[in-house]
Image (cartoon, helix red, strand yellow):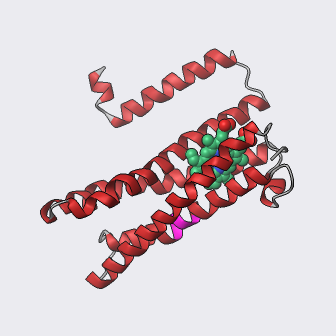
Amino acid sequence: MGAILANRTYAIALATLLAVLVIAGYHGGVMDATWTIAFVVFLHVLSGIVWIGLLYYFNLVQIPTMPKVPAELKGGVSKFIAPEALLWFRWGAVATLITGLAAAYLKGYAHQAFTLQAGWRVIGTGMYLAVIMAANVWFIIWPNQKRALGLVPADDATKASSARTAMLASRTNFVLSFPMLYCMVTQLYLGGAGNG
Ligand code: HEM
């Protein structure tokens, strides 16, 4: 068991297997439209946790701690940990966006939500905030991080200004994440989409 848990790929496979067992147990082989939507929302929340979990890691742990890391150790974070975290971060954002749009489409209210019609305003607001955050990841944070971390060539002044831009964009997403998440989870307590 230790060998499985110590290997990231095996651990992901084990988590997937356990989820499949739970799904098979509770749905008894019935995979209707409700099941499909529930499964897409499950994938949505899972990928959302990967994305926003790493956003919180950057903002609550890495960014505030970097100034305290001795100069000779900073490379360990910037050359090894940050690139790996950014990989999961940006693709987590894509998976969350696709599954979120799929959930709205499958439930038949994507248009009502994006036009902020009465009844769908809460989830629509959450979707707008999250789409802005995903665009921020791909069009501002990631290009600036590539320069800041030296993944693409840049002079020292450009690296420093890119690092600051990436940090401020990441903080913007952190600030947007609370109202975004509130909108995502609250719609259900209003009686589901159609009542917000
Ligand atoms: C990127 C764009 C996003 C879109 C288009 C989107 C869309 C949606 C939609 C349509 C629903 C409602 C599903 C339903 O009616 O059952 C939903 C629910 C939810 N979303 Fe998102 N979302 C996005 C990002 C996020 C992010 C970043 C998170 C962070 C974890 C998140 C977490 C959730 C949660 C927790 C729910 C509630 C699921 C439930 O209780 O059934 N979403 N999202």
Q: Nearer the viewer, residue 177 or 28?
A: 177
Asked whether the viewer can see residue 131, the reply is: yes
Residue plotted at (50% across, 50% down): 52
Compared across the picture, whether 132 is left or right of 64 comes to: right
Identify the residue shown where x is 37% and y is 36%: 9
Q: Quadrant of the N terminus?
A: top left
All told, the count of numbered labels is: 0
**Above/below status of 153 relative to 119:** below
User: With respect to residue 88, does 156 lie above or below?
Assistant: below
Measured as percent of width and height from the top left, residue 144 is found at 41, 73
Q: Give residue 157's position: percent from left, percent from top.
A: 30, 84
Question: Can residue 98 be seen in this snapshot?
Answer: no
Residue 136 in magenta? yes
Which quadrant of the view contains residue 14?
Answer: top left
Q: Is residue 119 above or below residue 38?
A: below
Residue 17 place in picture, x, y as percent:
49, 24
Whether the magenta-drawn stretch holds residue 18 is answered as no
Q: Which residue lies at the image location 57% right of the left edge and 61% below the top edge? A: 133
Q: Residue at x 50, y 29 (%)?
A: 16
Chain part drawn in magenta: 135-139
Q: Main secondary structure of the magenta part?
A: helix
Q: Nearer the viewer, residue 123 or 40?
A: 123
Where is residue 54 shown, x and y percent of the image? Answer: 43, 50
